[in-house]
Amino acid sequence: MATEPTAPQPPGPLSALVSRPAFWVVAVALLAALPLWRALRPEAPLPASAAPPSVVAAVPGPLPVLGTVPDFVFTDSEGRPFKSSGLLGKVWVASLGFTRCTRDCPAIARAMQQLQGRSGGLGDAFQLVSFTVDPDYDLPSVLKAYAASLQAGVRWHFLTADRADLEAVIIAGLQQPMDKKGDDPMSISHGEQLVLVDQRHQVRGLYPAEAEGAVDQVLRDAARLLNEGQP
């Protein structure tokens, strides 16, 4: 007996939908819009552990007076006396560090290098001063070699002194910590900020050396002080 051919089954609802041209038009449009939706959707806030690095913000209005650097006579990298009176009438940036430091000092030195390279237009009215916090090791000859390795120019000074005298200027004047707990260089700790000092030896700004925009803000604030023309 011959088998009758089976009648074709009508397409299901899904098959019928897929077969329609309008379905593919809508599907392609949705796929094309997906990247735009991803770009415009609001993002969840970053957790604290993923927060971006700190950014130095501009200070509105006059820069605050944060302290005063006492008068000092230290020794520079040439072995000559360096008097703070030579900085009167000038704006200067102070930094701390020591030549055996391998932690944060390289980043601080790079920031000072950038300040040197980008401040040529300010001329002799803008100076850089790096104080060692390891005076027992950082003799003038050591500082001289270190300054040469950083290609320091005549506006960048490297100073040393007795520890007690350094502490009086750094802690009380520059508002920066300085400590040594043993003979190991790794036991030496110090502030990591760039310190902006005005023409009267007043501290006018503290900037984390590794913060985004620190060098830019130091230069802007230094120019503000110079434009104010303080004696």
Image (spheres, helix red, strand yellow):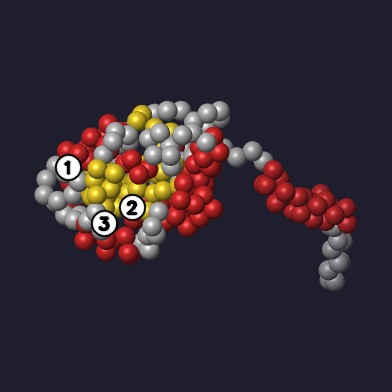
Going from the N terminus, do you reach mark 2 or mark 1 first?
2
Q: In terms of secondary structure, where does tag 2 sit?
A: strand
Label 2 near label 3: C-beta < 8 Å? yes
Q: Position of residue 215 (x, y in %)?
A: 48, 48
Q: Earlier in the sequence, mark 3 or mark 2?
A: 3
Front residue of 98/231: it is 231
Q: Real-space Cα distance between discs 2 and 1?
A: 18 Å
Amino acid type, mark 2: His
Tag 3 secondary structure? loop
Vertical placement of residue 88 versus 20, above or below: above
Q: Which residue is mark 3?
A: 77
The disc at residue 95 is none
Instruction: Specify the label residue 157 is tagged with.
Output: 2
Query: Are the residues at dot 1 and dot 3 in contact (C-beta closer than 8 Å)?
Result: no
**Comparing marks 2 and 1, which lies closer to the viewer?**
2
Distance Cα–Cα, label 1 vs label 3: 16 Å
Q: Is residue 163 left or right of residue 230?
A: left
| In the displayed structure image, the side of residue 57 where residue 86 appears, left or right | left
Residue pictured at 41% horizontal, 43% vertical: 92
Q: Position of residue 124 (x, y in %)?
A: 46, 51
Q: Secondary structure at mark 1?
A: helix
The answer to whether residue 51 is seen in the rendering is: no
Residue 187 percent location from the top left of the image: 17, 46
Q: Earlier in the sequence, mark 1 or mark 3?
A: 3
Residue plotted at (39% across, 39% down): 88
Residue 172 shown left or right of residue 36 in the figure? left
The residue that appears at 51% across and 40% down in the rendered structure is 226
Q: Nearer the viewer, residue 74 or 193?
A: 74
- Horizontal and vertical percent for residue 3? 83, 68
| Amino acid under disc 1 | Arg
> Would you name the residue on which mark 1 appears?
163
> For this rendering, which residue is in front, 43 or 77?
77
